[in-house]
Amino acid sequence: MAAWLDSLGKVTFPDGRVMIGASFRGVPFFVDTMERAGGRRTVTHDFPKRDQSFIEDMGRKTRSFPVDGYVIGPDYLAQRDNLIAALEEAGPGELLHPTYGTRRVICSGGFRVRESIADGGMARFSCEFEETESVPSSPTAVTAAADQVTAGGEQLVADIRARLALRAAVSLPASALASISSTISLAAEAMGAALAPLVAGTQELATLKRAIDNIVLDADALARSPVAVLDDFGAALIAFRSPVLPPKGGVTALLAAYGFAPPARPPATTATRAAEQAAYDLVLGIVRTLLVVEASRMAVADTYDSYDAAVAARDAICGPLDDQAAAADDDTFAALEQLRADLVRALPGEGSDLPRLVSHAPAFTVPSLVLAHRIYGDLSREADLVARNRVQRPGFVAGGAELEVLSDG
């Protein structure tokens, strides 16, 4: 017997006949011819006035396995029915092919069964199998992590506003509102001082000053209406979103405003002072939550030159988010924790290929252009090298000095 035949799955009958065996979904049958079809999927592009076409390769064709097989023997009818049931069963199944081994296929091309009087005790099958994956790999819709941060922040603010709208106005004597009014004024002034250096246009700067002045002037009235505090501060922040306020500087400015020093927290020594303390905590929480939510939105809208820079921006925001969550009610706590999780997923991002920061010490004093070429092989990176390390004399970068450079990723 030929050596190649020895490698095939086969059955030897008592009369010496050798038949090549196969199976589908564990149902055996015999074959005497084997085929495989394949190739490439292509699209032909024809262009006017050109004699040749461009053929675009769209990937490998699905491999197909046309099989001509049969079942035979005294019980061939039961074998035939079992194989038909296997071929008609939904979904892919395992084909044990005599020459190509085990393949996961589906009988997509259908099958035909032939029986004849002359070939009594036998049923012949013609089947068309195509290879398939075990799990569908079709694309699924996934919300981008950065979009999730933006949407989550907006929903958080909307939910806080809805709950505030159900609360009655703060009913306290004017003397008990001083700490709340002062908190509002100090927060507005801190926000104005932090944002003003980033606003380039004269008109935009005047708009910012007017928004801050209005909050300060209305501080006494706002102290009685937490929902108005949210609306006024929120409107001021929305007015200075990009492109008026650059994301990179905006995050730093908002976190600086977040850290403003409010007046001393009122002690809960009497019922009135306890109510004042609760109103103080509420207003301070509203302002700081708005600032950190807006910082989160700006952070994911920014671009970063290194993995470390993205992580630093994320960590700078996660601390304030944790602080606000610790003091929040149950509903706000859950939303703040979800926003934090979305922010961690967005920065630096799953599968980020941003370069990492590493240390490099040149052996000798060299010009920054030479150093950029040695490290990056790219002279255009010289400006980043100088700025990142605050090099005072680019023509003489000192040998042995530790420098901060970007890795390849």
Image (tube, rainbow, N blue to C red):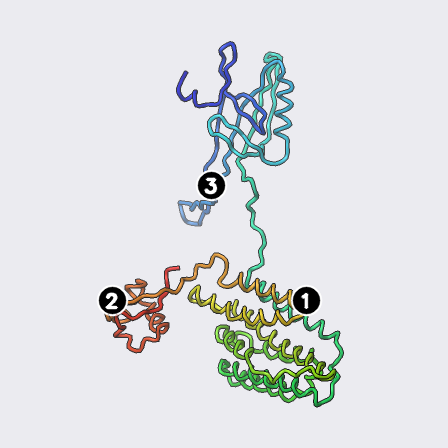
Residue 359 in view here: yes
Tag 2, which secondary structure? loop
Disc 2: CA contacts within 10 A as few (<14), some (14-19) or many (>=20): few
- The residue under label 2 is 363
- Counting residues from the start of the chain, the first of labels 3 and 1 encountered is 3
- Residue wearing tag 3: 60
Q: CA distance from mark 2 to mark 3?
A: 52 Å
User: Height in image: 123 above or below 202?
Assistant: above
Residue 89 on image: x %, y %: 64, 32
Q: The N terminus lies in which quarter of the figure?
A: top left
Q: Amino acid at mark 3?
A: Arg
Nearer to us in this view, 261 or 100? 261
Whether pointer 3 and pointer 1 mark residues with C-beta atoms closer than 8 Å, the reply is: no
Q: Is residue 144 above or below residue 33?
A: below
Q: Which element is circle 1 on?
A: helix
Q: Is residue 231 visible?
A: no
User: Element type at marker 3?
Assistant: strand
| Above or below: residue 186 compared with residue 128 | below
Distance from disc 2 to disc 1, alpha carbons, whole Å, reads: 58 Å
Query: Of discs 2 and 3, which sits in the foreground?
Result: 2
Callout 1 amino acid: Asp
Q: Residue at x 29, y 65 (%)?
A: 373
**Residue drawn at (76%, 78%), measured in percent from left and top?**
168
Q: Position of residue 226 (x, y in %)?
A: 69, 79
| Mark number, residue 331 | 1
Circle 1 residues within 10 Å: few <14, some 14–19, many ≥20 = few
